[in-house]
Image (spheres, rainbow, N blue to C red):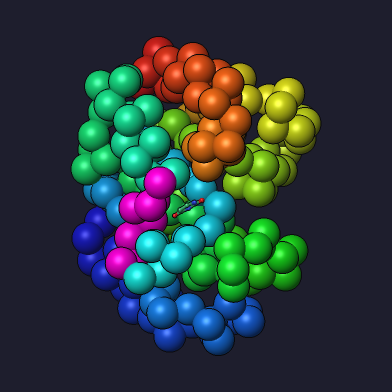
Amino acid sequence: MSGQFEQFEKDIRGCEKCELSENRTQIVIGDGTPEADILFVGEAPGRQEDKKGRPFVGRAGKLLDELLGEIGLEREEVYITNIVLCRPPNNRDPKDEEIKACTDYLDRHIRIVDPEVIVPLGSFATSYILDKYDLDNGSISRVHGEVFSISNLKGRFKIIPQYHPAAALYNPDLKEVLKEDFEKVRENI
Ligand code: URA
């Protein structure tokens, strides 16, 4: 496991597969334990994450830590990564071609962590993950908090999409929705 992860980190180092490599300070691979049962997939590193080299360390990260705490989990017990591993300039949305260039890394994360539950955070991660497993790809406002059970050649696991925590920083009503939807994660581990 750790050998596999070290090789993965080596392969990612110096990646120039898309234009995000031009402005990043560093590649933000992920955080937590690769042995985790739960894999969280966010959108992209922001300014703090780019500076510190860890995902979700800014305001959205504080809220993610709080939501994890509410369901009895600490960040060290899960694994957290993003759909793109480098910061988009001025925190703009990742472009299709940037997501495409980076999904190979997310797929490798999924193979290495081999989680029981995948939790996509926000519309970009949700759309990619639901599509990857040929699931009904509705908008995040429709599929948030739903539990998708997968049983196929790739294994048995669940996918539980969530609103992105950053959305709740601008719309406090969403914080309550996130809390309720995170309960679904607790019920499925
Ligand atoms: N938002 C994300 O989607 N990922 C981060 O790492 C930080 C904020």
Q: Is residue 124 visible?
A: yes
| Residue at 54% in and 26% down | 172
| Residue at 39% in and 36% down | 63
Q: Nearer the viewer, residue 44 or 36?
A: 44
Q: Which residues are magenta?
A: 52-59
Q: Is residue 74 left or right of residue 149?
A: left
Q: Is residue 57 left or right of residue 148?
A: left
Write down the quadrant of residue 185 in the picture: top left
| Residue at 51% in and 48% down | 42
Q: Is residue 141 left or right of residue 27?
A: right
Residue 12 vertical position relative to residue 152 in the rendered view, above or below: below
| Quadrant of the snapshot with the C terminus | top left
The reply to whether the magenta stretch includes residue 57 is: yes
Q: Nearer the viewer, residue 83 or 116?
A: 83
Write down the quadrant of residue 162 in the picture: top right
Residue 88 in percent (x, y) is at 58, 69
Residue 41 in percent (x, y) is at 49, 46
Residue 90 in percent (x, y) is at 59, 68
Q: Is residue 148 visible?
A: no
Counting every numbered tag in the picture gives 0
| Residue at 55% in and 86% down | 22
Residue 166 vertical position relative to residue 160 in the rendered view, above or below: below
Q: Name the main secondary structure of what is drawn in magenta.
A: loop
Q: Is residue 122 left or right of residue 58?
A: right
Residue 119 vertical position relative to residue 7 in the rendered view, above or below: above
Residue 45 vertical position relative to residue 165 in the rendered view, above or below: below
The reply to whether the magenta stretch includes residue 62 is: no
| Quadrant of the snapshot with the N terminus | bottom left
